[in-house]
Image (spheres, helix red, strand yellow):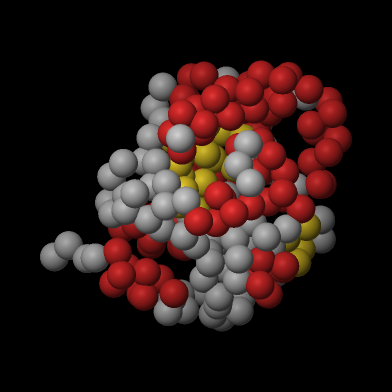
Amino acid sequence: MTQTLEQITQQAKACRLCEDILEPNPIFVISPKAKLLIVGQAPGRKVHETHIPWNDPSGDRLRRWLNVDRDQFYTLPEIAILPAGFCYPGKGKSGDLPPPKICAQTWHDKMLRLMPDVELTLLIGMYAQNHYLGDSKKATLTETVQHWEEYLEKGFLPLPHPSPRNAIWLKRNAWFENEVVEQLQARVGGMLR
C-alpha cells in the first residue's frame, strides 16, 4: 500500500523510536514538488526549541551558500529538508551528539518515494554522507567534499557542515567557497527560478 505525503508526515511527527535517549520533536520538511533536498545532521538546540529547521547561524550560512533568502528557504515547495536524525540528539563533549541511525533508516526511503522530482541532494556533514554515499565516500569529509564532481553525477553534493564551529575548516579550504559554492549557487538558481 502506498502511503500519502500526509500519512507519512503524521507518522513521522508522531515518531517515538528514540524517546528512551532523546526528547522527541521531529523536524523535517517534505514536499511533492521538491527539486532540492537538504540532508543535514540533526536539529540543534535552537531548532528544537523553535521547531524551524536551520533556524540558527548554521542555517544563515547555508542560505548564503545557496543564495536564497530566508523567506524563499522556508516557503518554496521546491526545497525539502530531511536531517539524518529528525530530533535534537542532545549535547556531547564537543558539540551535539550524533543522530541515531534508526531515524534515516526508518523514514528517508518512505519520504523520498513521495518526492520523485528531486534533482539535487545536498549531503551536509559526515552523517548524511555516511548514510547516502556508503562505501563510495572517501576516507575523510574533506576528501569527500574535494571529489564533489564525482558525486554530482549521481545527484549528490557533499558539503561540510555550515556551523560556525567549522570556520577554521573553511579558512583552510578556501577552494570550497570559491569553487563548490559557486557551482552550488548556479545549480540551485537554475532549479528554483
- Relative to 91, 52 lies left or right: left
Q: Position of residue 106 (x, y in %)?
A: 38, 62
- Relative to 152, 144 lies left or right: right
Residue 89 shows in this picture: no
Please tell me which residue lies in front, 173 or 105. 173
Residue found at the very far left of the displayed protein: 1
Q: Position of residue 97 (x, y in %)?
A: 69, 61
Please tell me which residue lies in front, 136 or 165. 165
Taking the spot 76% from the left edge, 53% from the top edge, the residue there is: 57
Q: Is residue 129 above or below residue 60?
A: above
- Relative to 3, 38 lies left or right: right
Q: Is residue 89 above or below residue 66?
A: below
Q: How many marks?
A: 0
Q: Position of residue 71 (x, y in %)?
A: 59, 54
Q: Position of residue 50 (x, y in %)?
A: 66, 72
Taking the spot 52% from the left edge, 70% from the top edge, the residue there is: 26
Residue 158 shows in this picture: yes
Q: Is residue 173 above or below residue 163?
A: above
Instruction: Locate the N terminus and report the quarter of the image it occupies.
Output: bottom left
- Relative to 16, 45 lies left or right: right
Taking the spot 45% from the left edge, 41% from the top edge, the residue there is: 36
Taking the spot 73% from the left edge, 58% from the top edge, the residue there is: 56
